[in-house]
Amino acid sequence: KAGVTQTPRYLIKTRGQQVTLSCSPISGHRSVSWYQQTPGQGLQFLFEYFSETQRNKGNFPGRFSGRQFSNSRSEMNVSTLELGDSALYLCASSLDQGQGAGELFFGEGSRLTVL
Amino acid sequence: LAKTTQPISMDSYEGQEVNITCSHNNIATNDYITWYQQFPSQGPRFIIQGYKTKVTNEVASLFIPADRKSSTLSLPRVSLSDTAVYYCLVGAGSGWGKLQFGAGTQVVVTP
């Protein structure tokens, strides 16, 4: 069973540009979450999508957005990039059985560097 | 979501047992306790999950007291490759997609 796939793995952008990151969840998983990880702030929750709808949102500015497609694949977009957006962006998927135990499966991440 | 508190760092030698305790005083009745491991520049990886008492798998054990306000991850006979950050989280059901990770515990294993 293929794991969570994120593309691109590495990218370099300049301030003011925008970037789109892609995530393909594990087959059958309907929930896709995005996290930002930086040395100073650790792992921070960005948002979660479930069945093409944003179900939960973290405390990030509106420059950070996302969407989920009917096949559960998800993209996140960051507009007007700032130096502080340099981070490892992680995508995770989960089965979401609605109750009980669960697990997040993470991808390898997309390493964004903003110059 | 229940907040968790765990030590910032722990040092150990190869072959020793490492025990990391996590406090989650506000854990809800239906919450499960899960531990993740993360190596640099990789996504976190599931280690173990439990609800109460003790759970053991091929890599770790999880001890949960009756009041469930804390839990202890036990890594037996650690090796250098166990050097990583370990996160304790609580959640349930559809809450897994919005987990808030704390700072985690940096475990450093030396020869």
Image (cartoon, rainbow, N blue to C red):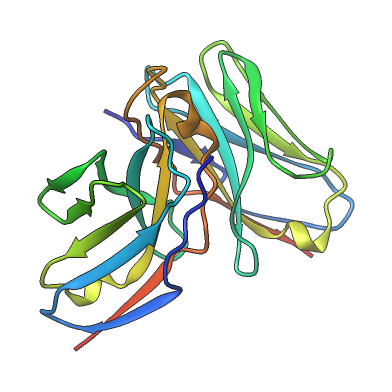
Q: Residue B39 sits in which quadrant?
A: bottom left
B66 vs B79: above or below: above
One can see residue A17 in this view? yes
A29 vs B17: above or below: above
The quarter of the image holding the N terminus of chain B is top right
A28 vs A86: above or below: above
Residue B18 in percent (x, y) is at 21, 72
In-front residue for pair A35/B62 = B62
Q: Residue at x 36, y 35 (%)?
A: A103
Q: Residue at x 41, y 25 (%)?
A: B93
Residue A58 in percent (x, y) is at 69, 40
In-front residue for pair B33/A77 = B33
A98 vs A103: above or below: above
Q: Residue at x 26, y 60 (%)?
A: B72
Residue A93 in percent (x, y) is at 45, 31
Considering every residue shown, the one lying at the far top of the view is A70
Tell me if B106 is positioned left or right of B57 in this view.
Answer: right
In-front residue for pair A8/A98 = A98
Tell me if A41 is positioned left or right of A102 in this view.
Answer: right
Q: Residue B33 sits in which quadrant?
A: top left
Q: Residue at x 40, y 37 (%)?
A: A104
